[in-house]
Amino acid sequence: MEVLFYTILTLCVLGVLAAVILYFVAQKFKVEEDPRIDDVEKMLPGANCGGCGFAGCRGLSEALVKNDDISSLFCPVGGSETMKAVAAYLGKAAAEKEPQTATVRCGGTCEKRPRTNQYDGAKSCAVAASLYVGETGCAFGCLGYGDCVVACAFDAIHINPETGLPEVDADKCTACGACVKACPKMIIELRKKWPKNRAVYVSCVSKDKGAVTIKACKAGCIGCGKCEKVCAFGAITIENNLAYIDPQKCKLCRKCVNECPTGAIKLIGMEPLPKVAKAAPAATKPAGEAAAAPKAVGGPATIALKASGSNPLLLVHPTKAVMESKAATSVEGVIVELKESGKNPLCLVRGKRAE
Amino acid sequence: MKTFPMGGVHPQENKLSRAKAIEVLPLPEVVQIPLGQHIGAPATAIVAKGDKVLTGQKIAEATGFMSANIHSPISGTVESVDMQLNGQGLRQMMITIKREGDEWVETIDRSTEIKRACDLDGAAIIAKIKEAGIVGMGGATFPTHVKLSVPPGKKAECLIINGVECEPYLTSDHRTMLEMGEEMLIGVEILMKAIAVDKAYVGIENNKPDAIAHLTKLAEQFKGIEIVPLKVMYPQGGEKQLIAAITGRQVPPPPALPIDVGAVVCNASTTYAVYRAVQKNMPLIERVVTVTGKQMKEPKNLLTRMGTPIQSLLEAAGGLSEEAGKVINGGPMMGRAMVNLASPVTKGCSGITVMYGADAERKEAGQCMKCAKCVSACPMGLEPYWLAKMAKKQGWEALEEQMITSCIECGCCQSSCPAYLPLLDWVRLGKQTVMGLIRARMAAQAPKK
């Protein structure tokens, strides 16, 4: 009994002693940390994906709190809204960026891009890319071993077994850029995210000459320049036999899609424009006169019109809102109304009427 | 019998062409000469489309010290200087020449007469070697003049000639030593003079008893040249392994070089090329290439001009059969499988090995069972399973600490792995990435100085 008593007593005394020592040590070595860091961290998505350039959300919160100028810091996952909230809390000016999504710029499906050899090394794009050209004749295209899939922390990119190419689930994609870094062929690009995940992009990164590209892959960009000519917004440039659509300038007018002879320009989330049977007669009409509008059956109405000056025939696609306006009962009505008010009919392209 | 102290494997030798005398391959109609066929900066082309060139004429100049000249292997007209596909299917700058006859540059002595006396001094010899564009012909393609230029503060103590040819299947060095033994030994003498040493060892594995006997007999006429028979063990032909086997000295990890332990190593074929360059003014425009494979009709050793399409070498040896699964540039251990057979023979191409059927396929990889066979097989004392795992996880800093840059990419780990793991693939990726990071760091530090 006595033994038990002394044991308990000793333990209690030791416990109290340790508590006292720990209390004073904790006071002595207390690290003063800005409580705002914790608050900011709670506001961030907590994905710890590294898309901001820091190791995790904690790193970004520390930087956000410490730096006076936070315009260079951005959380791609939370986007502008989160950044606005954080900036409001900290009383600083936040950077604003459009929402983006990862885009895989290769259309070399198994069908379009025949295999020329079989790779049996480590199943990794980085390893294969360091060894040789890849299983097909295209030196620029997707290798399909899924380094991007491994890199994605959001389960937003997967290899489609039928095409052998990765596909991005734009709803899950946070534009953290992990897949962009993981791809040794630099095929994946972060592009502007349009509503309803719409997109128009050149699904090819081959810088080979047209003949070489097409030999390896039927879906490759041959750099013919047709899309560049048809683009009314100067969004398309051809460099090194490769077309590139600037996501900042592109208005999703989709004219380039029909022009592309190889189908390298991809259209996502929208119906393609109906193929216009060379509306050449309309083009010869005097400037300012509207051409006959080919109507897409069941789809949204399409207006073909000739813009003033030397512009080629332009195709624009008015949105629902425009078509519901009173003047839009007839196609010509929309154009006449716009012209009378001195507005450029091209403003229709953005789905808004210029006010 | 001597060998290196650590690791190594003994793969099946399959030296099918060991008894085949060197044959001269007919001249190719068109050659493609890559500008980057050596370690270091690619050479700069000094000819343009439409130029007429003679055999042996310089067509590309070394870009800086760590580079090598390139000479035309045939006479004819330059068709283009542009990007062409190499063996790996990647685009590379190449000079394409169409053959017209076979006219040589006049200063080149093409006679087979052996010329022993050499009255040049060391610097003149190195200059001649540099001019001839000689690089290591064992596969590493390190410019020979760089190797021979001993940096100040260091001293070469011995010359080691690499006649090991440990890679299975290949016999080009073996045949060179047998058929051009005397010329090669004169080459050794020239190299000894160039680096001012009085001792040279020729390391030969004892699976080539004929070459050992032949050279031992010839070496009696030369002073300071010793033929050293070595136990058969792969990768004894690795520079560091050979130094360890012959002198017992260990080369420290990179960036140390063999010269840090007083050794200069040169391949047997390179030594023969040195003889031809110094005594005969012959630039490096041809080499012996072994064309071999288990089902190859006639495995051969072909004396081939550089730039010859690999396809024509295969045809000379009987062509590819249906079962051919892989055509490898080099031997089966360190060579690289090719996807483009129209690609040319380069300075570092010691053999073309064709693998058939099941030999050509890798077995499906399983799980690492930590048996450590790769660790005991590694001749550099690394831990390949760990390096591969870390490369997969992209732990570059950890890889640098674990000396991944010491890896000589011999493939012992992969060939000894009972789970058939693609260890070397990952280690190679890790090594490349780490070396890239080190270079980037050095480049970032350089301006500060």
Image: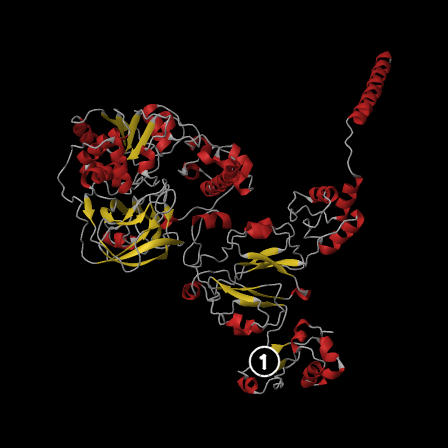
Question: From the viewer's perspective, is A15 left or right of A55?
Answer: right
Does residue B210 show up? no
Quarter of the N terminus of chain A within the rendering:
top right
* Kind of element beneath mark 1: loop
Quarter of the C terminus of chain A within the rendering:
bottom right
Rendering coords of residue B317 (x, y %): 24, 51
Outermost residue, top side: A2
Determine the residue positioned at 23% across, 38% down: B272
Q: Choose top left, top right, bottom left or bottom right for residue A159.
A: bottom right
Question: From the viewer's perspective, is B183 left or right of B332?
Answer: left
| A241 in relation to B289, above or below | below
Mark 1: amino acid: Gly
| B251 in relation to B48, above or below | above
- The front one of B331 and A97 is A97
Name the residue that disc number 1 marks.
A309
Rendering coords of residue B377 (x, y %): 42, 32
- The front one of B262 and B58 is B58
Does residue A205 show up? yes
Q: Which chain carries label 1?
A: A
Q: How crowded is mark 1: few (under 14 residues within 10 Å), some or many (20 or more)?
A: few
Rendering coords of residue B417 (x, y %): 45, 38
Determine the residue positioned at 44% across, 63% down: A213
| A149 in relation to A256, above or below | above
